Image (cartoon, coloured by chain):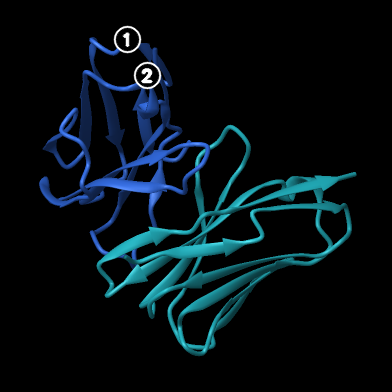
Chain colours: A blue, B cyan
Amino acid sequence: ETGVTQTPRHLVMGMTNKKSLKCEQHLGHNAMYWYKQSAKKPLELMFVYSLEERVENNSVPSRFSPECPNSSHLFLHLHTLQPEDSALYLCASSQTGGSRTEAFFGQGTRLTVV
Amino acid sequence: GQQVMQIPQYQHVQEGEDFTTYCNSSTTLSNIQWYKQRPGGHPVFLIQLVKSGEVKKQKRLTFQFGEAKKNSSLHITATQTTDVGTYFCAGGHNTDKLIFGTGTRLQVFP
């Protein structure tokens, strides 16, 4: 148990569906992140929120839409995804933004797009 | 763009053998972190190095940051089956963001 909880753990969705991934952290951290991990690529940073403000958007397609309503919760809204979007989506949090703080990862959501 | 490469991609060792993974950045790093991801699990922070030439040890694990702050290594002495997993380095750029390496998957045979 890392203090970062992701739901659901597994998700299968069609290309026309709309779904949301949820992340909650109980560590009192100020920064939250979405990463994508696929079989053939390293961990890819998608979005960074620091103090509930989006500070990083790594050229992610608009079919992925993040939302950070408060410092403890982070969502990733999905719509009209493609099969190549199938991957493990990991949420992480850290005390502050920046590269010198330890990142705590959730257990991830395994997404399959059919 | 900024890239962090790791070699080897895979390593199979007999239990008791040593293991080393190397991390190389295309640009100078402000810091480097190491993470371990067990099969089916999520990355877990191991350590952070900040100073040029820094060496840190955790039991059988030795971490090193290069003098030029562009490379790093993780060495495991006398591997055990519990060491199985993927080891990622993550380089900090201008203390702003972490770029994760490609990872080295370690398999240990008893």
Viewer-side residue, A30 vs B23: B23
- Tell me the crowding category of disc 2: few under 14, some 14 to 19, or many 20 or more residues within 10 angstroms, Cα based: some
| Residue B27 to residue B7: above or below | below
Q: Chain of mark 2?
A: A
Give me the chain letter of mark 1: A
Residue A8's disc number: 2
Q: Quadrant of the C terminus of chain A?
A: top left
Amino acid, disc 1: Gly
Asked whether the residues under marks 1 and 2 belong to the same chain, the reply is yes
Point 55% across, 36% down: residue: B41
Q: Which residue is mark 1?
A: A14
Residue drawn at x 20%, y 47% is: A59
Count of numbered badges drawn on the protein = 2
Secondary structure category for the residue under label 2: loop
> Which residue is at the front of the view, B16 or B69?
B69
**Residue A107 picture location, percent across and down:** 45, 33
Residue at x 25%, y 50% (from the top left corner):
A29
